[in-house]
Amino acid sequence: MALGFLYTCSCGKRFKVYVPKQKLFRTITGGTVNWERIDELDEANGSVDEVKRQAERTESAFIDVRGGERLRCSACQSEVNLMSHFRTVMMRLSHPRTAVRR
């Protein structure tokens, strides 16, 4: 299954973003996993096309980060580095803040 993330710009425009697993996980696992091969299999079995179909169904613009990590919103012209954004979100999810006890 290919990774498809939803990004909503501050103006409200929505993007469905295909992120190859090697771009997201290679820095974590190093060379222990052949992410390039896994991404090739995702593409061969139609998973990337499914992310495109999800974009259409949700009325989101499809973005493939293989073409570049920076996105300039066509509606408001704001820019974001999608990979930095998604990594930050994932880190927050994996390291939730602990409550401060008094």
Image (tube, rainbow, N blue to C red):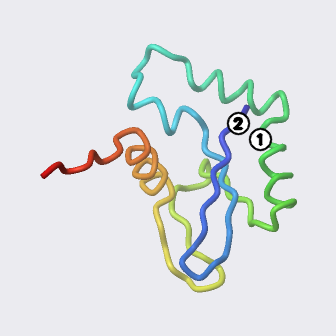
The earlier-in-sequence mark between 1 and 2 is 2
Q: Position of residue 94 (x, y in %)?
A: 40, 38
User: Callout 2 environment at 10 Å: few (<14), some (14 to 19), or many (20+)?
Assistant: many
> Viewed as shown, does residue 53 lie left or right of 76?
right
Q: Quadrant of the N terminus?
A: top right
Q: Residue at x 55, y 18 (%)?
A: 34
Q: Are marks 1 and 2 in contact (CB under 8 Å)?
A: yes
Q: Which element carries disc 1, helix, strand or loop? A: helix
Q: Which element carries disc 2, helix, strand or loop? A: loop
Q: Residue at x 77, y 47 (%)?
A: 51
Looking at the image, the residue that sits furthest to the bottom is 76
Q: Position of residue 52 (x, y in %)?
A: 81, 52
Residue 73, by quadrant, is bottom right
Q: What label does residue 2 carry, if any?
A: 2
* Residue position marked by numbered label 1 in the rendering: 48
> What distance separates the C-alpha of mark 1 from that of mark 2?
6 Å
> Viewed as shown, does residue 21 lie left or right of 61?
left
Looking at the image, the residue that sits furthest to the front is 102
- Number of numbered markers: 2
Q: What label does residue 94 carry, if any?
A: none
Q: Residue at x 81, y 68 (%)?
A: 59
Compared with 57, 25 (above or below) is: above
User: Callout 1 environment at 10 Å: few (<14), some (14 to 19), or many (20+)?
Assistant: many
Q: Could you say which is closer to the camera, residue 29 or residue 12?
A: 12
> Viewed as shown, does residue 5 lie left or right of 53?
left
Amino acid on which the number 1 mark rests in the picture: Val
Amino acid on which the number 2 mark rests in the picture: Ala
Q: Residue at x 60, y 62 (%)?
A: 7
